[in-house]
Image (cartoon, helix red, strand yellow):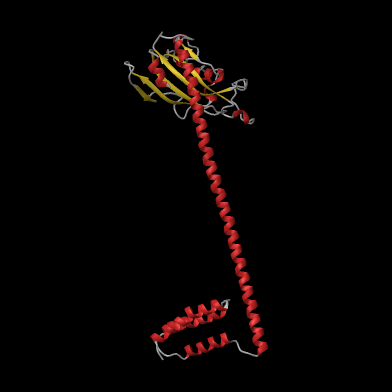
Amino acid sequence: MIETILFCLPTAFKGTIYRVGKPPALITERITSGVIDSSKKQISWGLPEKSDYNPPGRPWTDYRDDPGRPLEAMAWCVEKQISWTSADPKNDPRSVRLQVEGIEEDYHHMEPVLVRKSDLHLDVYPSLQYPRDYQERILWQGSDYVVVAVIKIHFEPNTFRVGGRETKVIKKLSRSLGTQLLSHHLHNDTVRAMQQLAKDRLDACNILADSLRNAITKSALIFSLVKMEMWNLREQWEALLLKERRERNAKREAIKDLEDLLLHWTGNAQELRNDLAAVQRRFLELPLSPQKAEKWLTLQIQERWKDLLARSPQ
């Protein structure tokens, strides 16, 4: 926007944008400044000059109208939400340098950039505090707008006037800037909303995953307990059958015979024998169905016996 003004207005040579922060602090900060060369072809950007409004900026209480300190054009634009034109710098009542140092400033025009409160959804926050003037009167109380920025354009001496074509162009472009800033604000709101939605979805997935893990863990525990109980019942049932039939437990008798063989086994395969003995004892403790017991016996015990016989034949 500054670029457009400097290229379109023949006598404008410098432009600055000040950002006005959120209420109630209203920290006003100089964002960028551009100076166009005499040929009107190139603009130099930056903040080379010393200014009280350079980052980090100034809060409202530091530049508002207060008795005993110089009046500022910035305070006028922010509080009144209307422009300030210095078409006669030697008699400018809001020139700080003129009041403090007696030095005239450039010819310039300052235009506030306004955005509707409703567009920023500020009207839905009744607890939002607005700044006050030195008499404790609330700013913008009867206005539908807030000030989000201020534009300052410098002109060659005696080349424009209050209410002239130049100031009207700046006012119209300030409205365009307000629309752009609103669009940027809405875009940022959309991005933040999408990020929050993604975070909420991730949190929901994590909660669901934790719930499923807990459910699966509990189900596995319950299933294990059921299997253990069934094994205990089967053991008791088998023991009862053997007792009634006055028979021995063939499974335990077989393992006992195998352990006796290992006990009297000769050779150097002591580690393999210890492993085989442990596997056989483990076999007695496992709650296996007949089919699984047969498979386990084949893979775990018979194979180890084959290895033992191969390494240490008797």
Q: Residue at x 45, y 90 (%)?
A: 265
Of 91 and 38, the residue lying toward us: 38
**Looking at the figure, which quarter contains the C terminus?**
bottom left
Instruction: Report x, y in % for residue 5.
Output: 41, 18
Instruction: Report x, y in % for residue 313.
Output: 40, 89
Of 87 and 93, the residue lying toward us: 87
Would residue 66 be visible to someone looking at this image?
Answer: no
Instruction: Report x, y in % for residue 135.
Output: 62, 20
* Left or right side of 107 for 284: right
Furthest-right residue in view? 244
Is 94 located above or below residue 221 in the figure? above
Is 219 located above or below residue 282 in the figure? above
Instruction: Report x, y in % for residue 252.
Output: 57, 85
Of 260 and 24, the residue lying toward us: 260
Toward which corner of the image does residue 51 lie, by quadrant? top left
* Left or right side of 181 for 137: right
Q: Residue at x 43, y 82 (%)?
A: 272
Furthest-left residue in view? 39
* Left or right side of 125 for 294: left
Would residue 62 be visible to someone looking at this image?
Answer: yes
**Looking at the figure, which quarter contains the N terminus?**
top left
Q: Residue at x 51, y 82 (%)?
A: 280
